[in-house]
Image (cartoon, rainbow, N blue to C red):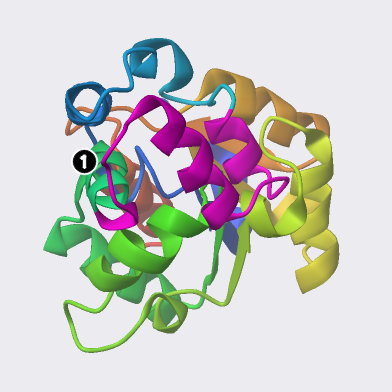
Amino acid sequence: MDNRHWVQGIENIIFDLGGVVIDLDRDKAVSALQELGLKEADEMLGLYRQEEPFLGLETGRMSAGEFFDLLREKCPGATDMMLTSAFNEFLRGIPDARLEMLRRMRMAGYRIFVLSNTNPVMYNSWIAEAFRKEGGSVNDYFDGIVVSFQELTCKPDPVIFTTVMRRYGLDPARTLMLDDSDANCRAAASTGMHALRVGKTEGDDMLAICNMILESRGL
C-alpha cells in the first residue's frame, strides 16, 4: 500500500458493513432464494446495489411486510422466517479480528461510524445478532450509524454521505470512508471526504488499512 501522508490528519473513519466489516456470499443468497421459488434472484440481487423489490426495501420505500408479501407471490408457501433465512445467506460472518480492530481504533482516539446500504430484514436479524457475539450490540462499536433504509436513499447517492457528516459534525477533510465499491468511494470523495476501496486480501482488507492508519501515527 502506497504512502498516504494525509491519513495522519484523519480523525473520523466511516465503515461500510457488507464487504468491509461483514463477509458476504451473494451466490449463497441467490441459491437459497431460488430454491424457495424466486427464479429472478440472480438479476435482483447485486453485490453493491439491489434491484426491485430489494432496492425498495433497502431505500425504505417498502416495509418488510410489503416486501415479504411481494416475494410470496413468487415463492408460494414460503414464510417470513424462511425468506429472512434465505436473504440472510448473503451475510457470512464477522471475524473476531475485525471487531477487535473496531475497538482498537476507538481506543486510539478515532471516531468510528457506519454508513451502509442495508435493509431492516438483515439489520434487525442477522446483523444485530452478529454484533452481540461479544455481549454488546452494534451500537457499542460505533459513535454513529447511518443506514440506507432509514435515510430513504442509498450509496452512491452523495446525499447519504453528506447526511452522516452533517448529523455527526464531521469535517470532511478529516474523515475517511472505507468501502468495497469503487462507485461509493468516488461518491464519498465528491463530498470532500477521503475514501479508500477495501479489498479482499491481507494487503488491502479492512485490517490492513486500519493498521496503516494506526502506523501513520506510530500506534
Q: Is residue 90 magenta?
A: no
Q: Quadrant of the C terminus?
A: bottom left
The residue lying toward the viewer, choosing from 165 and 172, is: 165
Q: Is residue 123 left or right of residue 98?
A: right
Residue 94 screen position, x and y as percent:
20, 56
Q: Residue at x 21, y 89 (%)?
A: 135
Amino acid type at mark 1: Glu
Q: Quadrant of residue 1?
A: top left
The range drawn in magenta is 53-81
Residue 33 against residue 163 in the figure, above or below: above
Residue 210 visible somewhere in the drawing: yes
Q: Residue at x 29, y 48 (%)?
A: 22
* Residue bearing the label numbered 1: 89
Residue 24 screen position, x and y as percent:
26, 36
Residue 18 screen position, x and y as percent:
38, 43
Q: Is residue 141 left or right of residue 99?
A: right
Residue 3 visible somewhere in the drawing: no
